Amino acid sequence: MVNDGPIEADAVVIGAGPVGLFQVFELGLLEIKCHVIDALPFPGGQPAELYPDKPIYDIPAIPVCTGQELVNNLLKQIEPFGATFHLGQEVNAVEQQGDGRFFVSTSRGTRFLSKTLFIAAGVGAFQPRALKLDGIEAFDEKQLFYRVSSPDAWAGRNIVMVGGGDTALEWAATLSTQGPNKAASVTLIHRRDAFQAAPANVARMRDLCERNELRFMVGQPTGFESEGDRLTALQVTDPQAQTHSVPLDVLLVFLGLSPKLGPIAQWGLDIERKQLVVDTEKFSTSVPGIFAVGDINTYPGKKKLILSGFHEATLAAFGAAPIVFPDKKVMLQYTTTSTQLHRVLGVAPAALD
């Protein structure tokens, strides 16, 4: 007989970014099994979606790694715990039941009854801010891109880039200098000759312009040109109201993210400035049994760093343990010495001298 009822779970984690993946690890150490839901078709969240090749320097004990390398290592770390992933779907309803469990449903009709819920949804249902030119969306994922996934595919191409933040400046520098795989030309367009970016990135951009390896234009995109189904040029109007036609093969747009809580705003949780209010003992929201970790939460002294999210996930897991195992005393153990954790992790203890 096929059971078409909801999936019964100890924990459901919403968000498969770095903090959500580490939440799986910390729950796994406490022998709490997870189901993980994410709107993206792959795990990794913002690092995998927006900056897979950008270096990260502030992960403890890892001097440098790319966003994708961090995600890959976290996925390997949680392998022993057998989490079940439900990707390409968004949670659209959360309702607490009479027995205290949470009914969770997704946009694909997947349903859960879970003892605990962990919201690790980053900035929420984020979307890149789109370039607002009538009809330009016809070239999405053909010649118009809001993220860089395969920079080598654009070697020898004429690239026009719109944006003035760190992401735009870093990719402008990378695509114009990456050896034999560099672009034929890179033109960076920003509305003014000032940037919301790190001084080092601005200095590098200006140096490349002086060496004619990168072109910079001040102006606003006001139109585009096409031939058949091909985008051929971007029209840019400068501060003197003169319009220039900038030929292109590829158009990259980095105008930032537009964070939206989406359905989370309807779940009856305390919210402050589009973030979920939590305590700092166990990172519980205003509803017991629902925890929030990572960029989605707020509390006094909050710092939006991946390593801060790792700390939050640890305390949230211990906060959830009494709910999942009400008759079990959960003790803090160390992975270095605990034979129980060695069993959970599937590793043999190191031999003693």
Image (cartoon, grey):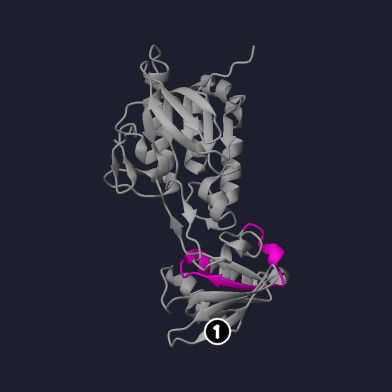
From the viewer's perspective, is residue 199 above or below residue 107?
A: below
Q: Secondary structure at mark 1?
A: strand
Q: Quadrant of residue 266?
A: top left
Q: Say whether residue 118 is left or right of residue 51.
A: left
Residue at 51% x, 43% y is 17
Q: How many marks?
A: 1
> In the rendered structure, does residue 161 fall within the stretch colored magenta?
yes
**Residue in view at x 39 percent, y 44 percent:** 296
* Residue 250 in view (yes/no): yes
Q: Which residues are magenta?
A: 149-169
Figure check: 175 above or below 267 = below
Residue 34 location in percent, x, y? 52, 27
Q: In the rendered image, which residue does mark 1 sit on? A: 244
Q: Residues within 10 Å of mark 1 (few under 14, many from 20)?
A: some
Q: Which amino acid does the dot numbered 1 rest on? A: His
Whether residue 100 is in magenta: the answer is no
Give the answer, above or below, for where 175 lies relative to 301: below
Which quadrant of the rendered structure holds the C terminus?
A: top right
Residue toward you, 343 or 113: 113
Residue 260's x, y, as percent? 41, 49
Compared to residue 171, the image places residue 217 above or below, namely: below
Nearer-the-camera pick, 28 or 338: 28
Q: 339 or 344, which lies in front?
A: 344
Which residue, as the protein is rendered here, is positioned at the far left? Answer: 300
Q: Is residue 331 visible?
A: no
Q: Give the residue displayed 61% in from the left and 31% down from the top.
A: 79
Q: Position of residue 302 (x, y in %)?
A: 32, 47
Residue 217: % across, % down? 51, 81
Quadrant showing the N terminus? top right
